[in-house]
Every structure is written in structure tokens, then in C-alpha cells.
Image (spheres, rainbow, N blue to C red):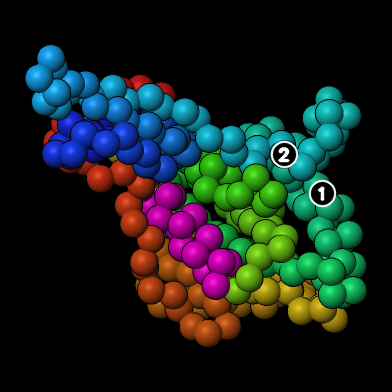
Amino acid sequence: MYQRVPSVRRETDGKPRTAQVYLHHKQGHRVPVLVKGSAIRDSQGDVVGSVEVFHRRPSTRFAQITQRERDEDAYIDPLTDLGNRRFGEAHIQPVLAAVAAGATTLGLVFIDIDHFKAINDTHGHRTGDAVLRMVGQSLANGLRNSDWPIRWGGEEFLAVLPGIRPEGLEVAAERLRMLVEHSWIQVGDQRVSVTISSGLVMVDPDEDLEHALDRADRLMYQSKAAGRNLCSSDSGVLLRTARTPVLDMGMPGGPRTV
């Protein structure tokens, strides 16, 4: 189920409108959707309703994985459907070479699920696996098509963002944090949700992957120490500035299912 979307019916001018939103999938994760709304008018030209069309925006899932690699499952994490650590290590190296040559930039967001052990202890490993998939899919759907979401191991994920600026990296990391915070799975009559803590770095031209990840890992623990559900960069802990995925404006009618 997902939250309802503001209708153009509430706009007095009746002009068509679009909104980019992240709707809540029945499996728990957030899905990027473009909503286009047009007014319905009566014979006198007054706005009496609206039509809203939902278009699923493409996500990053498998965007960087070739058909051969998919067929062999060599680079796929079967639980989350993301690239695995082997995929990440293989595909980041050419980008690091381009960064060293001054041809591009590279941002990394190292992500850890907060209190994940408590999920397994309280609800069992089956629910823990569902939470891992929920988080992974929300991360994938919150990135650009050119970015790579990777399950690095256990409850750790890595977002790889080539060609990004520092300010864009901060916006992206905060968006990922917000999307996970507003995702959940239903277990019986209980909602199960988690948060993430992140460390983000811009890779230096003379830096190898191990050193960059070590910096990001230390910043992730800085987020943990500051209270969790936070992102930290070299400039410190980021403010929680991302807007919630969808604002519920109280439209009539029941919830919809993606």
C-alpha cells in the first residue's frame, strides 16, 4: 500500500501538473513514480475532478550488469537482486582509473542498517531477509540510472555514484536515508521498519578503493555515534533535509497497491 497523492482537483486553476514521488510498494520498499494529473471540467468549464496517470520511473537495478553476467549470476546478490561485492570491486576499478586521470569524479556512500541484529532476534531471519531486500530495493530506486547499488555484505550496502559533485552526493545520501526510514514491511499486525547510518566520501585522485572505503566506514560510525539514522561526510553530520516520499493530502478513496 502507499500514501495517496495530492490531486490536481485541489488546484483552482485546473492546469496539468506533474510530481515525482516515491510510493510504498506492497513488499515494503519505495518505488519511483512520475504522476501526471489533468483536470476534468464540466460543460461550464469548472473543475469537477481529475485524472492521474502513474508512470514507473526506471531504477538502477541491473543497469550496469551485462546479460551474460545476469545469466551466470556471478555478480548478483540473490537476496536483494543488487550487484554483489564481487561486482562492485570489478566495476569500480575502471572508474578509479578515470578519477586518477581527472576524467570524472566518484562518490561513495557506505551504508549500514541500524540495529539489524534486533530484527533477527525479535522477528526471525526470514523477516530479516525481507528487511534486507526492502532496504536494497529502496536504495536502488533512490539512485540515478548511472549509479550502482551494491550489497557489500551482511547488512552493509555501498552506493557508487560516478560523475557526481560533493553537494549532489550529500543530497543523494540524504535521500537514501529518508527512503529507508519511510519504508516498512508488514508482519502480521505489526509494521517492521529500520533506519540506516551512512558515511559518504568523494574519492581523491590518488586514492585506492580500500582507503576510500575505510574513510567512508569511519564516517558511517560517526553517524552511529551521533544517534543513528544520519549521514556524515568530511564536513560533519548532515542535517535531515530530505522531504518525505509522498505527502498525504487526504484525498478521498482507499489506498492503492503498486
The residue wearing badge 1 is 86
Q: According to the image, label 2 marks what residue?
A: 63
Q: Nearer the viewer, residue 187 or 170?
A: 170
Q: Alpha-carbon neighbours of circle 2 within 10 Å: few (<14), some, or many (≥20)?
A: some
| Outermost residue to the front | 44
150 relative to 165, above or below: above
Residue occupying the point 35% across, 47% down: 245
**Looking at the picture, how far across and down is residue 74, in whole percent?**
84, 36
Q: Which residue corresponds to the image point at 18% horizontal and 21% vertical from the top-left?
A: 41
Q: How many numbered circles are shown?
A: 2
Q: CA distance from mark 2 to mark 1?
A: 16 Å
Closer-to-camera residue (210/178)? 178
Amino acid, disc 1: Arg
- Looking at the rendered structure, the kind of residue marked 2 is Ala
Which x, y percent locates residue 125? 51, 37
Q: Position of residue 219 (x, y in %)?
A: 57, 76
Reply above or below: 70 against 240.
above
For this view, does 85 lie left or right of residue 182? right
Could you tell whether 104 is left or right of 123 in the image?
right
Asked whether the viewer can see residue 206, the reply is: yes
The answer to whether residue 217 of the structure is visible from this angle is no
Q: Nearer the viewer, residue 15 or 155?
A: 15
Report x, y in % for residue 254: 20, 22
Q: What secondary structure is the magenta-colored segment mainly?
A: helix
In the image, is residue 70 part of the stretch drawn in magenta?
no
Asked if 44 appears above or below 22 in the picture, the reply is above
The span shown in magenta is 167-183
> Which residue shows up at 83% across the image and 28% down it?
67
Crowding at dot 1, Cα within 10 Å, few <14 / some 14-19 / many 20+, comes out as some
Lower sequence index among marks 2 and 1:
2
User: Which residue is outermost to the top?
Assistant: 43
